[in-house]
Image: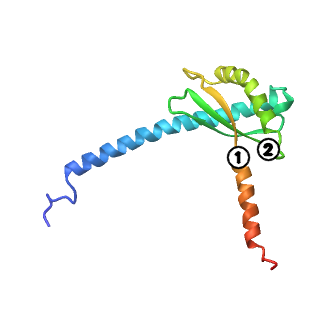
Amino acid sequence: MAILDPPFSILDFANSHARLRLAAITIMEYQRSDRVGDLLVELISEFISREIRDPRVRGVTITAVKVTKDLKHARVYFNLLGGGANRDSALAGLRSAGGFIRSRVGKEINLRFVPAIEFFYDETEDQAQRIDELLKKVKEPSSQ
């Protein structure tokens, strides 16, 4: 085995280095939008609990915020305490307070553009409850 024969060539090293740089750039873009989304969860939750007096948004919990890579659009997912019975009225309340929330977000964070905010009901908890009920039915012994 000669000392000059490396297990890989210089070209392999350059290609793997370029792939790592591309992966790092991609991860950093997503990290920034994720960080902005996490900050928006905190801010919007605080605004709803402390500054918005609309009774339709009582019991609203912000579960997640998905921000686009260009940071211009934010999808805010919410859930309701006590189930989703009043989700249409809560959605209407959040939409009516959307301009206020966006202006407050713009004052709190330093971004070139304040993201446009859209509200969506988060159905993951409802789906989890349905799956749980189905699993309980399957586990129960049949009484036939």
Disc 2 target residue: 84
Q: Relative to residue 12, is residue 45 depicted above or below?
A: above
Foreground pick, 2 / 53: 53
Residue 50 picture location, percent across and down: 81, 29
Pointer 1: residues within 10 angstroms few (<14), some, or many (20+)?
few
Task: Provide the residue designation for mark 1.
Answer: 123
**Which of the 4 quarters of the picture holds residue 7?**
bottom left
Q: Which residue is drawn at the image coordinates 82% and 78% (left, top)? A: 143
The residue at the point 78 percent across, 73 percent down is: 140
Percent from the top left, x then y, of residue 100?
A: 73, 21
Q: Tags 2 and 1 in contact by the CB under 8 Å rule?
A: yes
Q: Is residue 82 above or below residue 110?
A: below
Quadrant where the C terminus is found in the figure? bottom right
Cα–Cα span, label 2 and label 1: 9 Å
Query: In terms of secondary structure, where does tag 1 sit?
Result: loop
The x and y percentages for residue 1 are: 14, 67
Q: Is residue 21 left or right of residue 121?
A: left
Residue 66, disc: none
Q: Amino acid at mark 1?
A: Glu
Residue at 75%, 29% (x, y): give it.
Answer: 94
Q: Residues within 10 Å of mark 2 (few under 14, many from 20)?
A: some
